[in-house]
Image (tube, grey):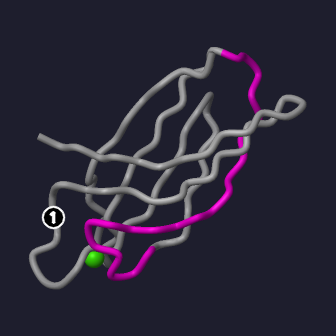
Amino acid sequence: MMVVILKIRLLMASGTLYITLVEATLDRNTEYWGKMDPYAVIKSNGQEKRTATHEDGHKTPKWNEELFLDVTDMFDELKITVMEEDTMSSDLVGDISFRIE
Ligand SMILES: [Ca+2]
């Protein structure tokens, strides 16, 4: 079971959606050694943006980073994925999808 609790702020202004990814609470650890280095990715309508990596943020990463997407349709699905950065390949920690209405 993967649970990701994200704290985000949304602001819509003239066709642009501003998403502030504040922080997350993660219930799993994909890292064998040391602490997780989580970052978040948002995807919608073929667009993709990511936050910086919170090094050693482990299960309570804080990004407090504002990203933005062009919104063509108010009902576009928005997907937020939390990844754990690794040198070889990043691991999926959890994800969530929702629509803005
Ligand atoms: Ca790592």
The answer to whether mark 1 is within 8 Å of ligand 1 is no
List the residue tagged with mark 1: 29
State ligand 1's quadrant.
bottom left
Tell how many labels.
1
**89 to the left or right of 33:** right
**Quadrant including the N terminus:** top left
Q: Nearer the viewer, residue 78 or 7?
A: 7
Say which amino acid is labelled 1: Asn
Q: Is residue 62 above or below residue 101?
A: below
How packed mark 1 is, by other alpha carbons closer than 10 Å (few <14, some 14-19, many 20 or more), is: some
Residue at 54 percent across and 45 percent down: it is: 42
Q: Position of residue 20 (x, y in %)?
A: 63, 52
Q: Is residue 34 above or below residue 38?
A: below
Q: Is residue 92 above or below residue 35?
A: above
The image quadrant that residue 15 belongs to is top right
Q: Position of residue 70 (x, y in %)?
A: 77, 35
Q: Is residue 48 above or below residue 55?
A: above
Q: Nearer the viewer, residue 65 or 73?
A: 65
Q: Position of residue 96 (x, y in %)?
A: 37, 35
Q: Which residues are magenta?
A: 54-74
Q: Secondary structure at mark 1?
A: loop
Residue at 9 percent across and 75 percent down: it is: 32
**Quadrant including the C terminus:** top right
Q: Position of residue 16 (x, y in %)?
A: 80, 36
**91 to the left or right of 31:** right
Residue at 39 percent across and 81 percent down: it is: 55
Is 96 one of the magenta-colored residues? no
Q: Nearer the viewer, residue 12 or 42?
A: 12
What is the residue that sits farthest to the right in this orientation? 14
